[in-house]
Amino acid sequence: MQRALRVIRWLPASDWLARYTRADAAGDGLAAIIVTILLVPQGLAYALLAGMPPETGLYASMLPLIVYGLFGTSSSLSVGPAALTSLITASAAGALAHGDPQLFIQAAIGMGLLSGAVLIIMAVLRLGWLTNLLSHPVIIGFVSGCAILIASSQLKHLLGIPASGNNIVQLGRSLSAHLNQSHWLTVAISAIAIASLLIPKQLNGAFKRSRLPAWLAAFMGKSGPILAVLVTTVLAFSFDLDQQGLAIVGAIPSGLPHLSTPQMDWNHWKAVATPALLLALIGFVESISLAQALAARRRERISPNRELMGLGLANLASGLSGSFAVTGSFSRTTVSFEAGARTPMTSLLTGMGIALVALFFTGLFYALPLATLAAIIVVGIIPLIELGEIRQLWRYSRPDSIAMVVTLFGVLLINVQSGLLIGVGLSVVLFLWRTSQPHVAEVGLVPGTQHFRNIDRHDAIISDQILSIRVDESLYFGNARPLEDLLYDHAMGRPGVAHVVLMCSAINHLDASAVQSLESLNARLDAAGVQLHLSEVKGPVMDRLTKTHLLSTLSGQVFLSQYQAIEALGGATKTPDAV
Amino acid sequence: MQRALRVIRWLPASDWLARYTRADAAGDGLAAIIVTILLVPQGLAYALLAGMPPETGLYASMLPLIVYGLFGTSSSLSVGPAALTSLITASAAGALAHGDPQLFIQAAIGMGLLSGAVLIIMAVLRLGWLTNLLSHPVIIGFVSGCAILIASSQLKHLLGIPASGNNIVQLGRSLSAHLNQSHWLTVAISAIAIASLLIPKQLNGAFKRSRLPAWLAAFMGKSGPILAVLVTTVLAFSFDLDQQGLAIVGAIPSGLPHLSTPQMDWNHWKAVATPALLLALIGFVESISLAQALAARRRERISPNRELMGLGLANLASGLSGSFAVTGSFSRTTVSFEAGARTPMTSLLTGMGIALVALFFTGLFYALPLATLAAIIVVGIIPLIELGEIRQLWRYSRPDSIAMVVTLFGVLLINVQSGLLIGVGLSVVLFLWRTSQPHVAEVGLVPGTQHFRNIDRHDAIISDQILSIRVDESLYFGNARPLEDLLYDHAMGRPGVAHVVLMCSAINHLDASAVQSLESLNARLDAAGVQLHLSEVKGPVMDRLTKTHLLSTLSGQVFLSQYQAIEALGGATKTPDAV
């Protein structure tokens, strides 16, 4: 009984199902129909990008959506195949498979499955904060690099030539070697597809200003993929263009997926572990940012841990359906939101809609040109290339822009996973570098008061024998040793000094390395005949210091206030200039 | 001419040579003689530990010491073979060589050479702060783990049985399999060696209290290794104990090393890169801590970058001499200091002393039992096992003690390098976790003043419509997103709120991720009909914010003080209880 209750608590669907209304059903139903129509060409396109058979694009849009509808918390997030996760899948599975097509498919499925497991573990252990490791500049650099790679990788389909590569150098070399073999019929179809994609986008403003209902205006603005699919498929079918060398999707096996797990040995599972972790982190960051942005527009709240669970189960469902990793999709989510999706029922209904397509309508996509799918990917991905951000970031912060540029070039020149890992590592190291130089000020007494201020900024008096120093940051392993040296050198640079008073008013936390450095500073100063004192130590910090040896070995005393310290040690008499 | 001047500036020896006195020569000469006598058995022992031929222990104590004397800055640091670096060498070279003895030696030499290059690069790029990545708990865990591993690895020599392994499990299994083959003559020699090592240690206090000169008392206290070598070598030689199965050092090739570089292909160089980096970091941390502790006792200052250069060149010299990585040795440095070493001339003279030994006296060590060398290592290393620190650390800080225990077990159960890397990674992640939850307080107006204080700690009045929040930490990628959610949830949890004022008095720095999160918070609050305001932004932070879009998109205003903000937005009227 208790167990059953717990399961229900984990099923966020129970919340909204209990108060589901007819108005909800109308909004959700319309949104589901529109998203289904959009999702079919997108699913096929992202399967192409992931290097997987076309039907897996439909499988990834079926069970995962139903599972997310039951376990997710966002009312309009559209989970399913997406560009970034498909690219990571293609890159990592390609690196593992070394040209073995069966192994490629198994590895892609295994990655999706494992990334689902990672997300579920993160949900159970409440590790959502791990995504903070991905700083904004690293994400911008990563997404821009991936977008350039994706666009480049689709050029072969747009031009009708063979090409391959895991980074921009390999791709560029491969493309330029075959450029003179471009297939002009394919190029023409690509041009028609791109025009069909761009025209509704251009008219977006006009649709919004027109008298159309909001949902229809939003749909019309996003209808490019459907228009492109319609026009080019009809052309290809009517004139049998595949006979003239146009690559088409061909026969898609109809029916629902069979649930199974990938057939891989232990070494292959180990090899997909890192990409699965990246898929999980990137997928979650993409999903949660979208979900939060939408929730704000309805004053709702998103629970990151429940989202982790929802997305994790959706990925597990995708892997079991024999398909690749999924995440929240930006374009479909916007359409769904504007079409009036009110509850996760939209996601449930969309999944069922795709199941209907897979059962009865796959034949309609037989003559769909691959060039059209490539055009859908390229037109969708190009706005994600935010190179303008580099200049902006360069003006704001050098370390941040370095992290971004390194991630971007890592993705472009090495590969997707290495680029991200290098970027994350670098941003952590740059952060540690910045905090390794905390702000430190020598303070003096403001005459006529009991206040101590930075002597560089205020008229304050000091003493020949006493050096009063305030540190404006918590101390941890990253800055403890440099600070120890800085304080020691400061004291040694002032020959008459017999006392150093460390004013701790801004120190919120001291880790074990900082305690060790204070002990070492105390010993070094003591050996040089200088006493170390502390003042204005915060309550919680003092409580923890009593558990260490520092207080018993301290050569000086702990004072409640800096003023008491100066009074007890002889008083301040000189202006700094006189020293 | 200018270039020559620059070289001389890089040669710290020019400083002290210019004012070298007869008294300096006396102190340095005596210290050099004593350290040379200590260094010969230690060099042979650490060569044994590193898995290298005995003569390489002498080579590592020759040119590197002369180079350090010329380029180092510490007056009494004794650079040369040491326990930790020898263990890392053995472990990493063993993993690479897969039982090929020639490759093992080349890899060990290559690692020393490369770690020297790494240190020199760090000196040139001023990257000494990278050693801050090694937090105190990680170092304690690492050193304790290494000490346990080293002691266990020497048991085979003490018992006269074969055994091998890179971690405690492999070693334990291998030792227990051969335990019943223990060679009792070897065990007896080991017992004699251990007794000879411990007796002078026990008498250390008595020597110090006696009328002996300080240098002699210090030498007597540390004379254990010499006594052990003397007693056991004489025993082994007199009774031809090697004929009865006692393992001895045997013939050591006499003469000076030939300078050369290791013969390895590109893949092997790549494989030794990570261990070389670890050797550089660990060696530098060990050296610099020792040098700083000594400098304090003479009110001297150490330049970390010059130390990096000195230690780097010493390692380069060791590699070119065909030997393994070196660093500052704790035991020899203490002896050198107490024997009155005054300048780096001590190091120069010691290097020459070892050269004399290598030229003329290697024959004296023919009958030296390996068991004696193992006993020297074990007795020297056991005090470094600081398991008591775990309990102390557990009381002081859970995350710190977790980092320590994980490093310890990583070293013991996997291997030396993985243990350290896992420990460093974990301590960074734990730090990011801690800072991902900055201290945030809702503040109210202290009646009758213009001051704002935490409403949980002070009697302060607030407003129904205004939420005033102070963040007590700089914002960066690690805490930006959680803070965004926290502030948003705070505002949503208070239905009547129309304004959120973020009091920025404690924010010293905002990175690009933090700006992004503030923009996103602004947009989310705006979508929910709440305005975001900033107050008390520090000058440097404000200067940089003007370079972003935040100020132009901010739904509210930027106020100079929190008081002005509250006045402008309608004033504070209620006590928090009434809300």
Image (spheres, coloured by chain):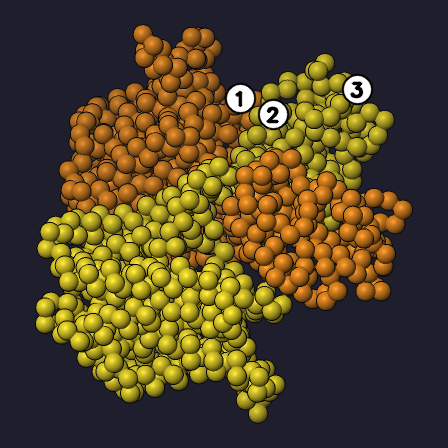
Chain colours: A orange, B yellow
Q: Residue under circle 2?
A: B490
Q: CA distance from mark 1 to mark 3?
A: 29 Å
Q: Tell me the number on the disc at residue A300.
A: 1
- Give the amino acid type for the residue marked by disc 2 in the picture: His
Viewer-nearest of discs 1 and 3: 3
Q: To which chain does the residue with label 3 belong? A: B
Q: Compared to A185, does A74 lie above or below?
A: above
Under circle 3, the secondary element is: loop
Residue A55, percent from left and from top: 23, 33
> Residue at (35%, 55%) from the top-left corner?
B382
The answer to whether residue B553 is visible is no
The answer to whether residue B219 is visible is yes
Q: Nearer the viewer, residue B38 or A31?
A: B38
Q: CA distance from mark 1 to mark 2?
A: 13 Å
| Label 3 vs 2, first from the N-terminus | 2
Residue B336, percent from left and from top: 47, 72
Q: To which chain does the residue with label 2 belong? A: B
Q: Nearer the viewer, residue A540 or B38?
A: B38
Under circle 1, the secondary element is: loop
Q: CA distance from mark 3 to mark 2?
A: 20 Å
Crowdedness near tag 1: few (<14), some (14–19) or many (≥20) residues, C-alpha within 10 Å: some
Q: Are marks 1 and 3 on the same chain?
A: no
> Residue at (42%, 66%) from the top-left corner?
B221
Under circle 2, the secondary element is: helix
Q: Residue under circle 3?
A: B573
